[in-house]
Amino acid sequence: MSAPSTLADACEAHFPGDYPAVYPYAVNYTGSGSLKAFYRCPCGREWVCWWDAGTVGWPASRSEAAA
């Protein structure tokens, strides 16, 4: 069993609920507690979202990850 990703997003090209959530294919820590997530929908559309690492429960540094 896996936990749902808090970084899931919806493709704006589709009516809400027509397609399942899209998960990032890459995530970069950009500093200052921010994550930059890259998405690609099965329809081919791509986009980027920025997330607050603490809010989504991701450790933002090695010292936080080790705690």
Image: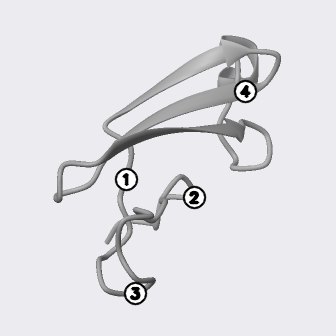
- Proximity of marks 1 and 4: CB atoms separated by less than 8 Å: no
Identity, as a three-letter code, of the amino acid under mark 2: Thr
Give the residue displayed 48% in from the left and 59% down from the top.
Answer: 8
Q: Residue 27 vs residue 54: left or right?
A: left
Q: How busy is the neighbourhood of tag 3: few (under 14 within 10 Å), some, or many (20 plus)?
A: few
Distance, label 3 to label 4, CA atoms, is 28 Å
Read off the residue under disc 2.
6
Image quadrant where one finds the N terminus:
bottom left
Residue 45 percent location from the top left of the image: 28, 48
Identity, as a three-letter code, of the amino acid under mark 4: Ser
- Tell me if residue 15 comes above or below residue 7 in the rendering: below
Using the image as rendered, state which of residue 62 and residue 52 is in the foreground.
Answer: 52
Read off the residue under disc 1.
23
The mark found on residue 17 in the picture is 3
Residue 61 percent location from the top left of the image: 70, 16
Front position among marks 3 and 4 = 3
Q: Secondary structure at mark 3?
A: loop
Sequence-wise first label, 1 or 2 = 2
Identity, as a three-letter code, of the amino acid under mark 1: Tyr
